[in-house]
Image (tube, rainbow, N blue to C red):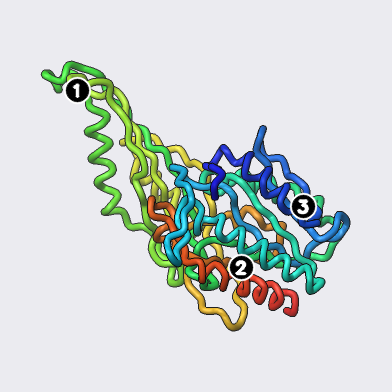
Amino acid sequence: MEIDSTSGREGAVTDWVHGFLAGRDWSTRRIPVSPGRDDMLATIGDDERPRVILSTHLDTVPPFIPPSIDGELLRGRGACDAKGIAAAMICAAERLRDRGAPVGLLFVVGEEVTHDGAHAANEFARDYFRDTPDSRTLINGEPTESTLALGTKGAMRVLVRVAGEAAHSAYPHLGRSATRDLVHLLADLDRVDWPRDELLGDTTVNIGHLSGGVADNVMAPEAEARLMIRLVTPATEVWRVVERWAFGRATVERGPTVPPVRLGVLPGFPTSVAAFATDIPELSQWGRPHLFGPGSVHVAHRDDEHVRITELRAAVDAYERLALAALDR
């Protein structure tokens, strides 16, 4: 957690994890993602293919917040999303290795933005597992309050652009304000009939960023907004709704999209539904997915991000039990 690994700057933390695990006799290899950025895979031996993979991400959202311990709380960026989870997974994997269980660790980059690390890991897995039976289990780590998620919402990024016509603001009839039109368009989002799913709940929309205009006394010639839509149904269904909403008033561009997923369950664990998206849809080659992690997503991207140390320690036991249950299935 002392290493700043804000998305795009993960090189130093990957180096640290690689050196730490190699020093504890794990067989480690890097999976290239982009210049200076790699995923990291650790297995028991060079030739052994793991049957259960504990995986999470090493990148974090900005801003970087140094770690501190406050009584029973571990505070700082990555405490629960997801460096605390990575630490718990490493401890659980070492226990599983001592038992002789065929376990592996996969740490990826870029989860908080484009999921490019998961894409690279999946391409790697196509060849890596080519000659092994398709009986793997992926246990992905995200803050689920130590419950096993039944499913997760997906996510779609959308760029909305409105064109106007510049003119002196004292004579608005000579131009058209793109910022005004964009504000009116965005206000209509609350009146859109978005899809709903019985398990995953409602489609939700966040207006994450707004920009436009050139000066206070100029009618804005252009404006744009970036949306994050949380998906509970197929992306194509939601995209049709977006196009109808914007038709004739703006152009829309579909960005990175992660579909919603249903997840596997194992006996003996409380369950929940996660409203956030994960790398799981992009890690399809790594096995049947499960999602579990200590900490709450409600504090994950906040300045007061934290996790209880007792919950982290309990997560070591939980990941061990999850892996053994999956292997016995």
Q: Rate crowding at label 1 as few (under 14), some (14 to 19) or many (20 or more) other CA atoms within 10 Å.
A: few
| Circle 1 or circle 3, nearest the eye | 3
Q: Which mark is residue 216?
A: 1
Out of 325 and 160, give the one closest to the viewer. 325
Instruction: Say which residue appears at 22% left-offset and 33% top-offset.
Output: 180
The residue under label 3 is 23
Q: CA distance from mark 2 to mark 3?
A: 29 Å
Q: CA distance from mark 2 to mark 1?
A: 51 Å
The residue lying furthest to the left in this view is 170
Residue in view at x 88 percent, y 56 percent = 47
Seen at 48% across and 65% down, the residue is 295
Secondary structure under the numbered disc 3 in the rendered image: loop
Q: Tell me if residue 30 comes above or below residue 296 in the rendering.
A: above
Q: Are marks 1 and 3 in contact (CB under 8 Å)?
A: no
**Foreground: 210 or 148?**
148
As drawn, the label of residue 290 is 2
Q: Kindly identify the amino acid type of the residue bearing the numbered disc 3.
A: Gly
| Residue 318 against residue 141 in the figure, above or below | below
Q: Identify the mark nearer the N-term, 2 or 3.
A: 3
Secondary element under disc 1, as helix, strand or loop, is loop
Q: Which mark is residue 225?
A: none
Nearer-N-terminus badge (2/1): 1
Residue 182: x and y in percent read 28, 36
Q: Amino acid at mark 2?
A: His
- Please state which amino acid type lies under the numbered disc 1: Asp
Tell me the SS state at disc 2: strand
Residue 304 coordinates in the image, percent (x, y)? 38, 54
